[in-house]
Structure formats: C-alpha cells, structure tokens
Amino acid sequence: MYGKCGEMNDVLKIFPEPNLRPRLSWNVLISVFARHGFFQKARDTFHDMVKQGSKPDHVTFVSLLSACSHGGLVDEGLRYFAAMTSEFGVPAGIEHCVCVVDLLGRSGRLPEAIAFIKEMPVPPNDFVWRSLLAACRMHRNTELGKVAAENLLTSNPSDDSAYVLYSNICATSGRWHWVKLKNQICTFGIGDLSHPESEQIYRKLTELRKKIQEAGYIADTSFALHDTDEEQKEHNLWMHSERLALAYGLISTPEGSTLRIFKNLRVCGDCHSVFKLVSNIISREIILRDPYRFHHFSSGQCSCGDYW
C-alpha cells in the first residue's frame, strides 16, 4: 500500500530485518524499488535475498526483470532470465517473457525481441504483442509495428491500444488523469474545461509555459500526433491532461509540499520534459504515477533517468 502510494520512507520503516524477512517481504521490496526507478537498489535487494538464504520465486523474477527493463539493463536482465531456470529452478512464465520482450524492445533491439517471441517457451499473448508494439512506436519501426498490431488484434480484438499505438493518434475518450487534493479526487481529460477552477488552471498553465520557455524549453511536437501545423501541435501539447492536473495541484496545495498525480496512460516525452523543468523552477517534488511506474521529479531530474 505504501509503495503504491509513493511513500518510500514508510515502506522501509515497516520491513523486518533482512535475517528475519520472509520471501514475500523480499518480493514486495524488489517490486517497490523497481516501480520507483531505484534499479540498483532492486538488484542489490535481490542479491541480499539470495545471500540470506531466501529462495527467489516466480514473482521475484517478474519484479527483477521489470527493474532491468525500465533501467535499460538489457544484458544483465537477459542473464537473470537465463539464471532463473538454470540456477534457481523457476520455470519461465508468460509474465517473464513479457518482461524480456519489453527489455529488448525498449532498448531498440527489435529483431532480437521478435526472435525471442518466436522461441518463447509459452505462446505469446496480448501483453507480449502490446509491449512489442509500444517499442515499435518508440523506435518508429512501422513494418514490425504492423506485425505486432495485427497479432495484438488477433489476440484481443477489443484492445484499443493497438489502434492508438499503430495509428499514432491519441484516443482521449474515457481516459482520465487525476490529482487528489486532501479527500477530493479531481479528474482531467485533454483540453478539459469542466473544472470549476478552469480559468485559474489555464492561467497557471500560461505562467508555467512562459517560465520554462525562458529556461530553454522547446516543445517536441512529435508527441502531438494529430496532423496539424506546428503552432496547433504545440497548443495541443499544452492541453494534455497531466499538465492540467499539474497546474491545478500547484494552485491548490501549499508551497514546498509534494505533488502527486496519477494517470492511466503512459506519460508523453514532452510532458516528461515539462515536469522536469517545472520541478526545478518551483523547487517542489512531483510524483507522477502512470500504469507502469512512478516518476519522481525533483530539481530538474527524474528518477527514471529519461529511460522508461
């Protein structure tokens, strides 16, 4: 619970000492470190677990491989995957295979990813193809992306991510990003005008935009995927719902407090750059959680190291 809420200090306070720690606790700790971008700590925790005589299981390796994937530790992750069966006797499951496809795909090793899928010990499912499709989107591999999209739609015809990723059009219907203020949850969609404080929110956005432009920000309009001119593309980027949530959080919370924003789609690269700059300009920590991981923005840097 603490880990999913981003409260890392509380996570570490409640764990037993290593020599008294059951396997479940080790697994939770590795998972939390992986989610929050502390990849070295996730690896160190795994090795501490083994040294203490606790045997890793299926869940342990899912978290460990996920940490390697999000940290860009490709070769190390492949070694863990091989050792999982040969050294620890844990059979490879579909979740581990998804992690390996993600590991290879994120790093741009797409031919290796598709080769791995063909030789997987279990049949590929929609998670495998979605991971490959996302990597093709990231690395602009249209040909392989088409293969991944077709297989994804065959596995799960109702999965709209295939259309979203392959067509490069952001589908906004029913996809909300939100920020929690005390006991109130506020939701935002792209270009949202429904909030009663919309005027103040957009005024704050304008202020932020001016400040980060003075700090050297240049919009990356490749993340504005509608076919419009450059000016309209930049305008569309500033309508992204996580920026609305950010502006609302800044006008609604005390200065110096940590701002937490949750969203259900992967943060775009331009918003990621904006959040880094804003964290430095306003001297506040911003924690953004998307469906896959946490991003801790502080002093102009992100815990993911710009690899996510």
Image: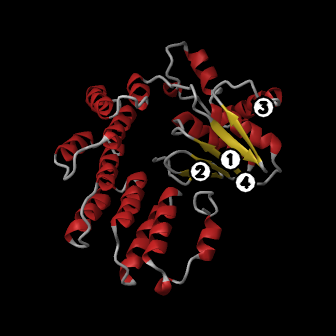
In this picture, residue 285 sits left or right of residue 132 = right
Disc ID at residue 258 = 4
Question: Type of residue at label 4?
Answer: Thr
**In front: mark 2 or mark 4?**
4
Give the spatial CA distance, label 1 vs label 2. 8 Å
Residue 77 in the image: above or below residue 163: below
First in sequence: mark 2 vs mark 4: 4
According to the image, label 3 marks what residue?
201
First in sequence: mark 3 vs mark 4: 3
Where residue 287 sits: x, y (%)? 64, 51
Disc ID at residue 279 = 1
Give the spatial CA distance, label 3 vs label 2. 24 Å
Residue at figure coordinates x 67%, y 24% from the top left: 191
**In front: mark 3 or mark 2?**
3
Question: Type of residue at label 1?
Answer: Ser
Tell me, yes or no, whether the two marked residues, 1 and 2, touch with CB atoms within 8 Å: yes
Disc ID at residue 81 = none
Tag 3 secondary structure:
helix
Total labels drawn:
4
Give the spatial CA distance, label 2 vs label 4. 15 Å
Rendered image quadrant of residue 240? top right
